[in-house]
């Protein structure tokens, strides 16, 4: 993520778990980044929201002075006020997008349409065990069974459900790798793979990639069309 965006999200307390790790790493290893964070922290402490109207009134008072009377001191103070107004506007009107919140609003694991689970029926095959665990939200267990199935032979559908499971387990980058692999070939799951890939990138605060995928999906598929249009609007 861009360093400026990281700092902005830090100052508004909207860092996701992944972004927080990146932020902490930069603080520990990048001296210039750490200095900038300290500077912005101090600046934000000075520019409080309740001071905005007071500063604005001061500026209006300077503007009301006769143009024919030039006072260097007043001019300097007025210039400072303009700068503070601009900085205040930056913090209060350019709030970063809360990608973690948007991800949570739109993500839900894809329903099981592969292996119907019948209550009371006992089956011991891997597929039934995997999807029984998946439906029960026992994702650690489901992941173990999906891995065993994929060791026997690669199946894009099983891999797709494994990616959903990984997203539930906060293993976002692993999920992205699977979804990208699935999209290398064309099949009926392409739109679904793309949707979850976009959400995964959103979770990692990569808004640009998420918007690119969503835009392409919106133009080529009717899958989740309303949700995609709504999410794209939220990302503007």
Image: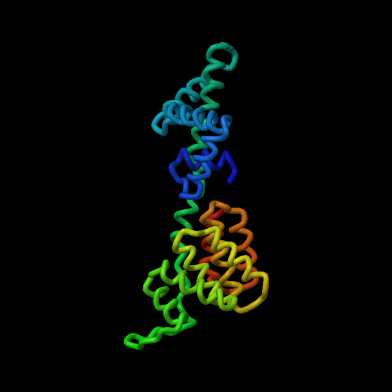
- The residue sitting at 56% across, 78% down in the picture is 152
Residue nearest the observer in this picture, 190 or 142 = 142
Residue situated in front as seen by the camera: 29 or 7: 29
Relative vertical location of residue 161 with respect to residue 167 in this rendering, above or below: below
Horizontal and vertical percent position of residue 16? 47, 49
Residue 213: image quadrant is bottom right
Instruction: Report x, y in % for residue 141.
Output: 41, 70
Which colour assignment does the render follow?
rainbow
Residue 226 spot, x, y in % from top left:
52, 69
Question: Does residue 63 lie above or below 143 as drawn?
Answer: above
Looking at the image, the residue that sits furthest to the left is 120
Give the residue displayed 59% in from the left and 43% down from the top.
2
Question: In front here: 49 or 220?
Answer: 220
Residue 49 image position (x, y, % from top left)? 41, 33
Query: Up-down: is 126 above or below 62?
Result: below
Please name whichever residue, 111 or 155, is drawn nearer the observer in this view of the structure.
155
Q: Residue at x 51, y 56 (%)?
A: 203
| Count of number-bearing discs | 0
Residue at x 47% of width, y 40% of height: 10
Q: Examine the rendered structure and indicate whether residue 62 appears above or below residue 123.
A: above
């Amino acid at each position: 993520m861009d360093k400026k965006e990281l700092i902005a999200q830090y100052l508004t307390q909207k860092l996701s778990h992944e972004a927080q790790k990146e932020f902490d790493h930069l603080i520990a290893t990048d001296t210039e980044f750490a200095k900038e964070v300290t500077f912005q922290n101090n600046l934000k402490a000075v520019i409080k929201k309740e001071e905005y109207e007071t500063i604005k009134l001061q500026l209006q008072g300077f503007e009301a002075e006769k143009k024919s009377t030039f006072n260097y001191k007043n001019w300097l103070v007025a210039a400072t006020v303009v700068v503070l107004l601009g900085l205040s506007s930056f913090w209060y009107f350019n709030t970063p997008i809360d990608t973690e919140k948007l991800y949570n609003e739109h993500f839900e694991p894809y329903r099981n349409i592969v292996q119907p689970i019948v209550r009371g029926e006992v089956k011991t095959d891997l597929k039934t065990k995997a999807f029984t665990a998946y439906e029960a939200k026992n994702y650690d267990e489901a992941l173990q069974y999906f891995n065993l199935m994929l060791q026997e032979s690669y199946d894009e559908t099983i891999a797709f459900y494994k990616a959903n499971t990984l997203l539930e387990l906060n293993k976002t980058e692993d999920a992205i790798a699977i979804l990208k692999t699935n999209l290398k070939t064309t099949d009926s799951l392409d739109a679904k793979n793309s949707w979850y890939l976009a959400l995964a990138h959103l979770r990692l605060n990569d808004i640009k990639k998420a918007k690119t995928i969503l835009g392409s999906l919106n133009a080529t598929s009717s899958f989740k069309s309303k949700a995609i249009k709504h999410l794209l609007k939220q990302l503007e």
